[in-house]
Image (cartoon, rainbow, N blue to C red):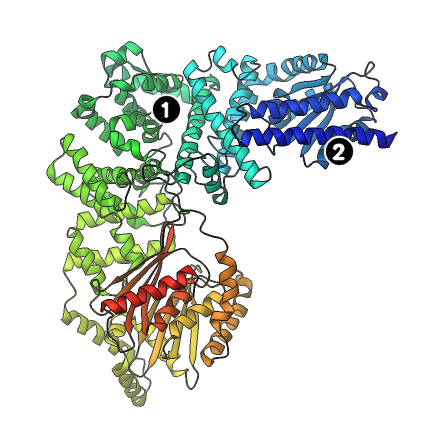
Amino acid sequence: MVTNIKNRYDHASKMLQKKRERLISGFLNRKDPFFLEHNARILDDYFRESFERSEVGPMMGINKNPYAIFATGGYGREEQCIHSDVDLLFLFEKNVPDKTEDLIQEVIYPLWDIGLDVGHATRSIKECVSLSGKDLEVLTSVLDARFICGVSLLYSELMEQILKKVIIKRSDKIINRLIETNFQRHDHFGDSAYLLEPNIKEGQGGLRDYHTMLWIARIKYNIKQPRDLEYSGLLSYSEFRILKEALSFIWNVRNRLHYIAGRRCDQLYFEYQTELANALNLRKQNGLQPVERFLAKLHSRMEVVKQQYLMFIGEQAYTEKSKLSKKLNTQTQINGLAQINNIEVKRGMLNFVSSEAILDSPDLLIKVFEESARLQVPLSSEAKRQLKEFIYLIDDDFRNSSFALKSFERILFAPPTTIDVLNDMLSTGFLVRFILEFKNIVNRIQYDEYHIYPVARHSLLTVKTIKKFGTSEDKTEDQLYGNLYKELSNKRLLLWAALFHDIGKGYPGAGHSQRGAKIVNDILKKRGFKKSDIETITFLINEHLLLIKTASRRDLNDEGTAITCAGKIKDIERLIMLYLLTVSDSISTGPKAWNKWTAALLRDLFLTVLNILKKGELATGEVVETVNKKKEEVLLSASSLQARQELELLFKVMSPRYLLYASTYDILEHIELYKSLGNADFVWKVTRSSDSNTRAVTICAKDRPGLFSKIAGVFTLNSIDILDTQAYTWRNNIALDIFEVKPPLDQIFETERWDKAEANLKSALAGGLNLTEALKEKMSSYRTFRPRTSQRPNRIVVDNESSIFFTIIEVFTYDFPGLLFSITDALFRCGLDVWVSKISTKVDQVVDVFYVRDFDGQKVDSPDQVAAIKDAIAEVLSGRD
């Protein structure tokens, strides 16, 4: 008997599996636009058939203790995605009988066998009502509940009691809890309408925002179906249509994400994005890769959900008890909003008095934003609707009017607060209509692992970051930025440059800074800006990458580096603006583009250039004076005449560059290290930085060709990341290499790791350790994972113009363990010594920069040599070596 029952249910589950496979195949081939509903309904059919054929059900006394099976969660809403959980509620009128477990085993176990994730709850009506009053998750699952089979009257009885005993008594509290829970979810998962790896369910702009709207509407208006949002007047016809289209796209993405991942997955990881773009048949267009077009589409749809949710809760979740409401209404009277005419504050939000007023005075379209910034009062949902409806009134006369320009500048200059007016201008479409060139960067994705936000959002965030400098909202922990910002005589020029600094990215091709400067030149001319202001703003846009590129890719100990920057910038005020723009741009790009190391490099460069602009270039006499002063300070450490004579002999073998740029303290440390070298191949000293985030490894060694690459290889072998290097060679054939590195990951065993690395280097220099072979496995295992983002090609630049004494080699590529070793080993085989290296990032690619000379101490400038260097590096990057 038991075997027959099992066979019967196995057959039913296998039939369900076949139906699902056909359904999924149809969906993937774009033949089923109603996949979610159909996927839910074939599950309904299975449960109804199971109920009808149940052997356990009749033994449970359904007449005496009626029961029913309900779909809950996404299954209840008929949003059943490919790998979504199947959530069920077994509901009993009275108590839950002992036989219930047998019923569950009979119905659910076969589904587990075919790989479905089935969750279930068994409750009496009384228990369900009681739990709904205590647990928000239980309540929302009941609000989504849909009757499948059993005694249907239990559904109406449950809903009646939930309404009477839970919702009517506590509706405001429940709604406030729903909204608060959603805010907490947003804080945890982030704003999915902007993130490059968004959570399409839980993040802001995700499906959970839509579900919260449904739950609030069911609690407050007792709606039954999503369409009732429109029929009940909660959304307009066009709002519901746009929301439905956005949700359809997001669900399509979610289903395909489930399919590609082979499991329930709502985080859109990089590794799935390219395949998803291909599955959606997207092609390269207007300079955008298919994956960038996909993310742009997804972000725009999630922005729809986000904005609709914010408008909805602004209207429906307002509580009359709000103290802020009274305060704002009082503030409005005090500030005399009546003088502006036709804008008023109601229930703590800004409104237009009427639509007719907008038609009579289109200036209200920007004035309402200015008042929002001035009063710190958000726009009401109705005001946002009216903005969208009358956006067509913004024409060329409006854009180029002095009134609109002054109003916009007051908004641009307004202090940073919780009311993000510029973002509201973007989301309502006003900003794009007011500055037409902004359209091309809205939802424009920079597909790499460094830019968190689309270009337009990044630009607004850059403005906001600048305005936070020196305020309580400043999170940089560096007072320099705030002090510099306060000193600026014309902050508006910096803020305009920040707003426009990436506008050139809206057009295909390289050189977005130069292109952007030309675009902005035309924008500002039309709006009547002074010529000198235009020159400053366009200069900042054109050169907004100058400082970060120089700091991360050039030797800051080379005086020529700072002199070149000073020659381009020329003016101290411009330098300060360019520095603040660079810092805010990097911070707003994301944590991978901004860290303490980057901040320190930028600060050093800025202060050096500032000193040059204030005092002029460092004269030869000053150089001699600086070196002589250091020598005297070092000689003071001598304990005897003999020790002094030994130091004077050492000065003769130290290079002028070393004596100029090494500090007195470092020189003394290096001398002690040199004295301890003896007959060893090398000695080293590992020093912690003050914040313990980095280590300085100073290596004193007998110089030999390939020394640098061997050190780099040993560090790679021991998973120690190199940040920066300096190499000095004394005339007595002593090499002094200083590596700035990240500490080992497991700092508890850091000493053991350094001991191992030291032993590895000894072996490598003695010829016992073949680093190429030792690193091969580590490098090959990593290279099986190709870059998760852009597919930009490797690039090698050989520069013989920027430095008087060195050839500079820039390598743009993708990171992998052993990269630095591979490149420096190739340089060694080309007969080159590395004197300085800079390890940097160009958002999506690693940029390794090397200052080199040949073994005779000369620059490498013949075309044949340059070609050979490029070929050698290209070969190791392609993995053919």
Q: Is residue 489 visible to the viewer in this orientation of the structure? A: no
Q: Secondary structure at mark 1?
A: loop
In the displayed structure, 403 sits above or below 500; it is above
Label 2 crowd (10 A; few <14 / some 14-19 / many >=20): some
**Residue drawn at (52%, 62%), measured in percent from left and top?**
747
Foreground: 819 or 573? Answer: 819
Q: Are marks 2 and 1 in contact (CB under 8 Å)?
A: no
Which amino acid lies under the numbered mark 1 shown in the image of this protein? Pro
Left or right: residue 295 versus residue 255 is left
Which disc number belongs to residue 378?
1
Provide residue 258's location: percent of width, then percent of height. 56, 36
Left or right of 62? Residue 252 is: left
Please, is residue 857 above or below residue 583 in the view? below
The residue at 81%/22% (across/down) is: 57
Q: Residue at x 40, y 74 (%)?
A: 699
Q: Position of residue 279 (x, y in %)?
A: 48, 36
Image position of 677 with respect to 59: above or below: below
Q: Is residue 318 left or right of residue 8?
A: left
